[in-house]
Amino acid sequence: MHGLNANGLQAHLAEQHAWIFCGHADAAVGGYSSLAFVRSGQIDTILASTIVQIVRQHTGKLGLVVLNGCHSLTLGAELVEAGVDKVICWDSLVADEAAIWFSLGFARKLAASDDVLVAFDAAVASVLSVTEPGVLDSGRRGWVQKYELGDPETDVAASKLKRGRRDDRNGGRVVAGLHAVRDGLRLVAL
């Protein structure tokens, strides 16, 4: 839903089977990270514990939550504990463009198959199959893979962190981030 703000979350979730949040999931409020909604062009946020309370009221119908934003694993785990059957989230920073490709791949496959884990695999493949102009090992110009999975904060040398790229010896790919799927109380593959 375009333009959803924190105040409208309760009403928005009332009849939903799935909620896909795309945005910043690391907005600091009350000393903790939470989701950043937008209201009148400014960040609109509530405590993560309030989001959990709101979602808990809808777990009878709401079976899937996708938190497509940086460092959303803690909130994702809390939502699983609150009764959401499946939660997809990120255990790291995520490159903005990679998050867009992830959402597109996930939504397209979910609409076609109605299987969350199949859609998750398609979303990961969607990110990893993005290419950009580059140089092949032979020295010839061509199109090369843009993203790889990893934690941009730990997998990239500090001098390269702003660009989010490994050095050219490692293919120069952008470190997209690490996703997680929570299925019940167990962590499902990455």
Image (cartoon, rainbow, N blue to C red):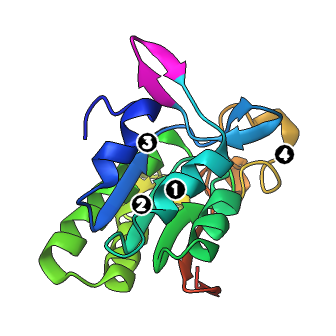
Residue 22 located left or right of residue 1: right
Dot 2 or dot 1, earlier in sequence? 2
Residue behind mark 2: 127
Label placed on residue 157: 4
Along the viewing direction, whichever of 164 and 72 lies nearer the viewer: 72
Where is 56 relative to 167, above or below?
below
Residue 137 located left or right of residue 167: left
Label placed on residue 29: none
Image location (x, y in percent) of residue 68? 48, 52
Tell us which disc is closer to us: 4 or 2: 2
Mark 3 crowd level (few <14, some 14–19, many ≥20, 10 Å Cα): few
Residue behind mark 3: 97
Dot 4 or dot 2, earlier in sequence? 2
* SS label for mark 3: helix
Q: Is residue 130 visible?
A: no
Q: Do the residues labelled 4 and 2 touch (CB within 8 Å)?
A: no
Point out the stretch of residues depicted in magenta. 37-43
Tell us which disc is closer to us: 1 or 3: 3
* SS label for mark 4: loop
Amino acid at pointer 2? Val
Q: Are marks 1 and 4 in contact (CB under 8 Å)?
A: no
Amino acid at pointer 1? Tyr
Q: Are marks 2 and 1 in contact (CB under 8 Å)?
A: yes
